[in-house]
Every structure is written in structure tokens, then in C-alpha cells.
Image (cartoon, coloured by chain):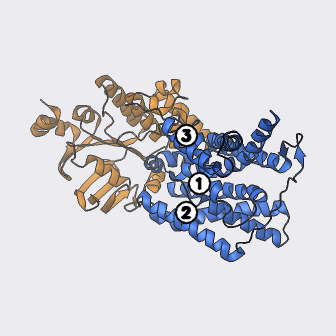
């Protein structure tokens, strides 16, 4: 594996008294795409929320060489973790362009921000057409693209994506994944995504973890995981 | 006709008072999603602070500006000390603390400056304008209201920090994920609301005189104005405030039995009517969502 950008050791998380993650160990490669597969309620979203400081956690998390466990969400965002949350986190009453501006809220380089908005529109031409439209009126696919674009505006070192395929038509899923691939290959963006749509995710990812009831039950190169008999039956449906 | 015009203008001048108060209410509602029942008492307290400065011999505008700054800081401090620890608490806890704040500020003002009614100066004079339709103080107060409204509009529409404040209020979780320090945005909202309240108090005091209970009914009218205009719209709050002033006056003049005594009832009836017919208020943003 190449350089490790983020590593978690004995990561546990709980909502109140209910523990949902039971000591996860995993590494995210710099410049790679890592995927967490699992069924509903397996702890995929909780893993991302734990990495963003949105729930109570214990264990060690190292990001870009520094310990970050226990940091608050806004600090982790400022360190370069762009979390595109479940439900996409759109600022629905604001315009598309304002959503992008908000992505750049932790930055101060006016010219750089303007250039990045242009770059985001380059990746997502539909968003340019809808720049002044209320973001809540966009279609599901457009909102997913806006969410990714908003994350890009943060100039992140790592992007966390929570089910980018959720609720989207297959063709739109393909479109979103094609753009994620370009972002990874052209911009060297490191990505950690959690998915139920194993087919799309395994095709993009370099490394995969399988998570069941809050524990990692399998880990390996995405290709090998995709060939595994049990995974195929449970998640790929053939 | 003459009587009608007079009553409309008299309504507009009291409406200016309500508009300012409504503006402060909307400001804090935007930041914290709650109505602050202590808003009026905060404004009253600020006005006493400025009165004290004037007593010590400060020039009017110096006291005015200094009071705005002090109130802003006071608002931020109240949020940081009292409300930040409550951020996960249910709405009712907030309401109880609002009421406590109300009582504390009211009694503290009574203790420090006693309950005798004090006169308060106006920087605009009291010359009648337009053939006695409106006094120069009322005109000045209206201009001040509109200037604040304009400043707020520019702030929220065109500055990054204004955008961040709107984002923090609309969707705090997403706001944190893009690195916005939501807690400080809320504190900033409190500071701004306190500052606007201070201006309202200093503009209102020459009309209703200064005493610890000066804001009681005005806060109600301010709520009415804010609800009529829509709690999400500063412009709506101002228009709502003026409308409440005019409606109240016309009803008092033309509807038999209303008179002076039942005027406050008009404000409450307006709140109920608007909430029943158009809950988002006349100018409130109707949220467009896809389902």
C-alpha cells in the first residue's frame, strides 16, 4: 500500500448508550479510493460520522501524520476532510452558487475560490446552468453533484462520501461515479466512500473493507473482495 | 379624510417603534430559531446604559455608538455564558431561561436605576413636519429603521460572514462539515440582535419614557409585527411593524368599542389571524423542497 493518509485504530463509536462501532482498524491510502461495504445498519455511516467528530468516539485516528481523534467537526473540516454526508447536506434554501461559496468558507483566497467555482462547474456543467437556482429544487442527481462540488471547494485532502448512489437512477449513478474517478485520477483526490451499491463502488475502489454490525469482517484489494463468493452473493446479487 | 390621514401617520410613527423591535426579534430568530422573550428587556437595559452615559455628560452620539458596542458584547456574552451550555437542551429549557433573563434584567434595571419614569432625549428634536402629520423625531426614527434594514440586507446578502451565519442557522450540521464555527455564528447573531435592540430602545425611549417596564407592550407589538411580516424576513418584519402601528391606530379610531384600551388586543388578534391564514407571514420565505 502507498502512503497512509488516515488510519484508525480500535475505533469505537456510540449514540448515547448504544455502541455502534466495536473497535475498527483500517487505513486509507493517500491518493487512493477506499470503500466500506455493508448492509443497512452495519455501521458505514457511523464510521464516517466518527471520522468527522459528529458522534462520541474512542480509539486513535491519525490524519496526515497528526492525531485528530476528539477534534470537533469544524476543525476536522479545516484540516482537509470534506464529508459529503448522508442526505447530501444541501443548503436547500440557498442558491447553487451560494452552496459552493459555503464550501470555501474555511478559505480566504478570493481568486482561488473564484477559480475553484469555475473548476467545479467544469466538472458539473449542469450546476453552472442552475447557478442562481434554489438548491432544494435540484433533482437528486444534481444535488449529489452539488454536494461533491461543495466538498471540492474545500480543497480537501480526503473526501468522505456517504452513499453517493443513494436514490439515483442507474445512469445518474454511472455519471456520478465517472466524475469521482476523474477527480481521483486527475486531481489525486483521496476518497473514502461507503456504499450499498457494491458493483459501482468496487469498480472504482482500490481497497475494500466489509463491515457487519459494527465490525470489519473482511479487508483486501477491491478486485479480490469482488471475486469473493460470499460478498458476491450478499452484495452483488449473482 | 384629515382625521384618517392623521391617524395613518400617527400609526406610522408608532409603527416605526414596532418595526425596530420586530427587526431585533427576527434577527435572533434567524440565528437560534427561537423567539427571545427577553429581547425587550435587553433593549430596555441597553437604553438605561446609554442614559447613564448621558448622565455622566457624554455627548448623545458618543453614548449612542458606545451603547451599541456594549450591547453587542453583552449579547455575545449572554449567548456564550447562558445559552451555549444549553445548546442540546429542549425548547422548554430555553423558554424558561428567556423568562429568567427577562426577570433578571427587569429587576436589575429597577435596582440600579429605580422605577421612576425618566425622560430621554431625542437627537432629532420634536419639530412638527408636513403640517403636523409627523414629528421630526418620528421621521428620524423611521430613517434609522430603514438604514438598519439596509445594512442588514447588505450584510446577509453580500458578505461571507453573513452567508456563513445564514448557513449555520439553516443547517448547522452541514455548516460544521464545511468548517463554519457554528457556535460563534450564533453568538454573533445574539450580539447583532442586542445591538439592534439597543438602537430600538434609544429611539423608543423619547416617546414612551424610560423605565424598567417600558418594553412590555412594545415587545408584544414587535412580535405581532414580526409574525405579520414573516419571521424569516427582516424586510417583512419592518413592513409588519409599520402595518401593526397603522392598523392599531385605525382600529382604535374607527371601530367602536376598541378605543385605547383594546388596542393591544388588536395586536394579538393579528398574530392569531396571520398564523391561521398564512403561517409564514406576508413576506416569509416559503421553503421549496423536493420530495
> In the depicted view, which residue is nearer to us: A64 or A18?
A18
Tag shown at residue A101 = 3
B128 sits to left or right of A69: right
**Mark 1 and mark 3, same subunit?**
no
* Quarter of image, res B154: top right
Q: Residue lying at the far front in this picture: please name it.
A: B257
Discs 2, 1: same chain: yes
Q: Which mark is residue B79?
A: 2
Residue shown at 77% from the left, 36% from the top: B4
Compared across the picture, whether B138 is left or right of A150 comes to right
Q: Would you call the spot at circle 2 few (<14 residues within 10 Å), some (14-19), or many (20 or more)?
A: many
Q: Residues within 10 Å of mark 1 (few under 14, many from 20)?
A: many
Chain B in the picture: what colour? Answer: blue
Q: Which chain is orange?
A: A
Residue B140 in picture, x, y percent from top left: 81, 48
Precedes in sequence: disc 2 or disc 1: 2
**Cα distance, mark 3 to mark 2?**
27 Å
Question: Which residue position holds label 1?
Answer: B189
Nearest-to-viewer mark from 1 and 3: 1
Q: Residue at x 56, y 67 (%)?
A: B101
Determine which quarter of the picture holds residue B129.
Answer: top right
Amino acid at each position: 500500500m502507498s502512503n497512509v493518509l488516515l488510519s484508525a485504530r480500535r475505533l469505537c463509536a456510540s449514540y448515547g448508550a448504544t455502541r455502534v462501532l466495536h473497535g475498527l482498524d483500517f487505513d486509507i491510502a493517500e491518493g487512493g479510493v477506499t470503500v466500506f461495504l455493508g448492509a443497512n445498519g452495519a455501521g458505514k455511516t457511523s464510521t464516517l460520522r466518527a471520522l468527522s467528530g459528529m458522534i462520541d468516539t474512542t480509539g486513535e485516528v491519525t490524519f496526515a501524520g497528526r492525531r485528530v481523534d476528539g477534534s470537533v467537526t469544524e476543525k476536522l473540516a479545516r484540516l482537509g476532510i470534506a464529508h459529503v454526508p448522508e442526505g447530501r447536506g444541501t443548503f436547500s434554501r440557498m442558491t447553487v452558487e451560494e452552496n459552493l461559496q459555503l464550501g470555501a468558507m474555511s478559505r480566504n483566497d478570493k481568486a482561488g475560490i473564484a477559480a475553484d467555482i469555475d473548476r467545479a462547474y467544469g466538472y458539473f456543467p449542469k450546476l453552472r446552468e442552475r447557478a442562481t437556482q434554489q438548491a432544494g429544487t435540484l433533482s437528486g442527481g444534481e444535488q449529489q453533484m452539488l454536494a461533491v462540488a461543495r466538498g471540492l471547494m474545500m480543497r480537501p485532502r480526503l473526501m468522505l462520501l456517504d452513499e453517493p448512489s443513494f436514490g439515483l437512477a442507474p445512469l445518474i449513478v454511472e455519471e456520478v461515479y465517472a466524475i469521482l474517478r476523474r477527480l481521483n485520477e486527475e486531481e489525486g483526490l483521496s476518497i473514502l466512500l461507503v456504499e450499498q451499491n457494491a458493483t459501482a463502488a468496487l469498480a472504482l475502489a482500490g481497497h475494500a473493507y466489509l463491515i457487519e454490525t459494527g465490525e470489519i469482517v473482511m479487508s483486501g484489494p477491491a478486485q479480490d473482495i469482488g471475486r469473493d463468493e460470499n460478498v458476491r452473493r450478499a452484495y452483488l446479487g449473482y | 379624510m384629515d382625521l384618517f390621514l392623521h391617524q395613518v401617520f400617527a400609526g406610522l410613527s408608532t409603527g416605526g417603534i414596532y418595526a425596530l423591535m420586530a427587526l431585533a426579534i427576527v434577527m435572533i430568530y434567524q440565528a437560534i430559531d427561537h423567539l427571545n422573550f427577553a429581547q425587550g428587556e435587553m433593549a430596555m437595559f441597553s437604553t438605561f446604559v446609554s442614559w447613564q452615559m448621558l448622565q455622566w455628560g457624554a455627548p448623545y452620539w458618543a453614548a449612542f455608538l458606545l451603547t451599541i458596542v456594549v450591547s453587542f458584547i453583552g449579547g455575545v456574552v449572554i449567548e456564550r455564558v447562558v445559552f451555549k451550555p444549553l445548546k442540546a437542551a429542549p425548547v422548554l429549557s430555553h423558554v424558561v431561561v428567556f423568562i429568567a433573563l427577562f426577570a433578571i434584567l427587569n429587576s436589575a434595571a429597577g435596582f440600579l436605576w429605580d422605577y421612576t419614569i425618566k425622560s430621554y432625549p431625542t437627537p432629532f428634536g420634536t419639530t412638527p413636519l408636513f403640517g403636523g402629520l409627523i414629528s421630526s423625531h418620528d421621521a428620524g426614527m423611521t430613517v434609522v429603521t430603514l438604514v438598519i434594514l439596509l445594512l442588514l440586507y447588505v450584510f446577509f446578502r453580500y458578505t461571507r460572514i453573513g452567508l456563513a451565519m445564514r448557513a449555520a442557522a439553516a443547517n448547522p450540521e452541514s455548516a460544521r462539515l464545511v468548517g463554519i464555527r457554528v457556535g460563534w455564528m450564533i453568538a454573533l447573531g445574539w450580539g447583532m440582535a442586542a445591538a439592534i435592540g439597543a438602537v430600538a430602545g434609544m429611539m423608543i425611549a423619547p416617546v414612551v419614557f424610560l423605565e424598567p417596564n417600558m418594553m412590555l407592550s412594545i415587545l408584544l407589538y414587535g412580535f405581532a409585527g414580526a409574525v405579520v411580516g414573516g419571521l424569516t424576513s427582516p424586510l417583512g418584519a419592518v413592513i409588519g411593524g409599520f402595518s401593526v402601528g397603522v392598523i392599531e391606530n385605525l382600529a382604535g379610531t374607527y371601530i367602536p368599542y376598541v378605543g385605547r384600551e383594546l388596542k393591544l388586543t388588536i395586536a394579538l388578534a393579528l398574530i392569531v389571524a396571520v398564523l391561521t391564514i398564512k403561517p409564514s407571514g406576508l413576506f416569509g420565505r416559503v421553503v421549496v423542497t423536493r420530495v
